C-alpha cells in the first residue's frame, strides 16, 4: 500500500523514424527504430515517484520481455509493484512513426491493458480502501474504469481522473470525481462545448461543476492551468520555457498535482508546482526521459523567483 495508487496503462512505444510516411500499399526503408516504455498510467506514476511521492502502480502486463522491462523500470523508480497482474496476452504496444517534420502517426494496441477486468478490481479493494488518493486515466476498458470510480467512491478514496484520451463520460460517473484534469481538447469533448477562448474554457468548466465534478483543473498548455470550483475560478499562469517536445506534459502535470494533493497542499500551490513540472518536461525530448526529479524542479522554481 502507498499514499498514491495509480490504476492505469502500460504501453511500450515502438518509434520508427522515417523521412516521409509510407502511402497505402507502399513499403519504405526507415531510419531507425527505438523502444520506449510509456502509457499514461506508467508515465504519471513515474512522474510522481521522481518527485518523491510514495506511489503504487496497478495494471496488467504480459508475461513477455516488455512486461519485464516495465517491472524493472518501476522498481528502479521506487514504485510499488505488488499488485501488477500478468496475462498471457502481450503487453500493450504503440506503433509510432515520426517523419522528418516531427509529425507522428500512432496506433495503440491495448492488448494486456484491456485484460484488466472486474475480477482484478475486486482483488485490489483493500488497497483502494487504505490509499490517500487514486489516480486514473482512460486507457483501460471504459466499463472497468467506471467501476473503479464507483469503488473509490464507495470506499471513500479521493479520485483524480485525467480524462485522456478524450471521450464523453456519463454524468453519474463525473459526479464521483474529486479532481478532473482535462486539457482543452478533452474539455471540449467532455462538455461538447468550444474551448478556444478563455470565456469558453470558463463556461465549459462551469458545465462540469454543474454536473457535480468537485474540482476542475483544466490544463492550458503554455498558458498554465485553470482551477475551477463552485467557490471560484482562477488561472494559474504557466512558466516561460523553450519548448522542444510537449510529449508527457499532461502526464507530468498530473503526477505532480497528485503528489501535492496527497500531501494536503492547497490546490493553488499544487497547480503552481504542477505548472513548473509540466514546463520542465517540455524542455526535454521523450516521455519518461523528460520527467524531472524533485531537485531539478526546486532549482527551476528558485531561478524563476519573479514568476
Ligand atoms: P497535454 O499534454 O495533456 O495536452 P497541456 O498541453 O495542457 O496538456 O500541458 C500540461 C501542462 O504542462 C500545462 O498546464 C503547463 O503547466 C505545462 N506546459 C505544457 N506546455 C507548456 C509550454 N509550452 N510552456 C510551459 N508550460 C507548458
Image (tube, grey):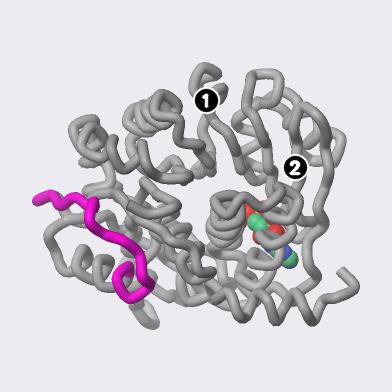
Per the image, label 1 sits on a secondary structure element best described as: loop
Q: Quadrant of the C terminus?
A: bottom right
Write down the residue under mark 2: 227
Residue 153's tag is: none
- Side of 68 relative to 254 (left or right): left
Write down the residue under mark 1: 176
Give the x, y percent position of residue 230. 77, 27
Q: Residue at x 64, y 67 (%)?
A: 277
Crowd class of label 2 (few under 14; some 14 to 19; many from 20; radius 10 Å): many
Q: Is residue 24 visible?
A: no
Work out which residue is located at the far left of the displayed protein and give it: 88
Q: Magenta stretch: residue 33 in it?
A: no
In the rendered view, tell whether residue 68 sits above or below residue 289. above
Of the pair 279 and 193, the residue shown nearer to us: 279
Residue range (magenta) = 74-88
Q: Residue at x 69, y 43 (%)?
A: 218
Amino acid at each position: 500500500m502507498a499514499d498514491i495508487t495509480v490504476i492505469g496503462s502500460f504501453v511500450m512505444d515502438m518509434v520508427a523514424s522515417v523521412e516521409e510516411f509510407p502511402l497505402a500499399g507502399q513499403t519504405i526503408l526507415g531510419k531507425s527504430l527505438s523502444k520506449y516504455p510509456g502509457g499514461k498510467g506508467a508515465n504519471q506514476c513515474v512522474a510522481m515517484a521522481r518527485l518523491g511521492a510514495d506511489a503504487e502502480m496497478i495494471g496488467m502486463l504480459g508475461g513477455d520481455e516488455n512486461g519485464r522491462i516495465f517491472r524493472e523500470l518501476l522498481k528502479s523508480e521506487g514504485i510499488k509493484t505488488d499488485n501488477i497482474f500478468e496475462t498471457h496476452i502481450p503487453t500493450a504496444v504503440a506503433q509510432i512513426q515520426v517523419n522528418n517534420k516531427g509529425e507522428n502517426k500512432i496506433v495503440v494496441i491495448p492488448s494486456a491493458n484491456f485484460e484488466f477486468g472486474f475480477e482484478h478490481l475486486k482483488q485490489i479493494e483493500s488497497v483502494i480502501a487504505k490509499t490517500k488518493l487514486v489516480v486514473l486515466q482512460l486507457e483501460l476498458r471504459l466499463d472497468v474504469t467506471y467501476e473503479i470510480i464507483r469503488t473509490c467512491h464507495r470506499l471513500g478514496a479521493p479520485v483524480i481522473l485525467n480524462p485522456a484520451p478524450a471521450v464523453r463520460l456519463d454524468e453519474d460517473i463525473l459526479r464521483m470525481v474529486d479532481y478532473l484534469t482535462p486539457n482543452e481538447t478533452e474539455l471540449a469533448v467532455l462538455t461538447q462545448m468550444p474551448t478556444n477562448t478563455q470565456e469558453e474554457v470558463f463556461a465549459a468548466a462551469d458545465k462540469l461543476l454543474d454536473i457535480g465534478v468537485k474540482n476542475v483543473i483544466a490544463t492550458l498548455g503554455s498558458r498554465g492551468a485553470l482551477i475551477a470550483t463552485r467557490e471560484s475560478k482562477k488561472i494559474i499562469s504557466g512558466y516561460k520555457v523553450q519548448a522542444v517536445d510537449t510529449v508527457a506534459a499532461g502526464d507530468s502535470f498530473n503526477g505532480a498535482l497528485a503528489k501535492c494533493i496527497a500531501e494536503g497542499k492547497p490546490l493553488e500551490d499544487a497547480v503552481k508546482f504542477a505548472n513548473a513540472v509540466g514546463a520542465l518536461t517540455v524542455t526535454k525530448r521523450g516521455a519518461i526521459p523528460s520527467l524531472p526529479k524533485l531537485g531539478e524542479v526546486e532549482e527551476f522554481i528558485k531561478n524563476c523567483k519573479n514568476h
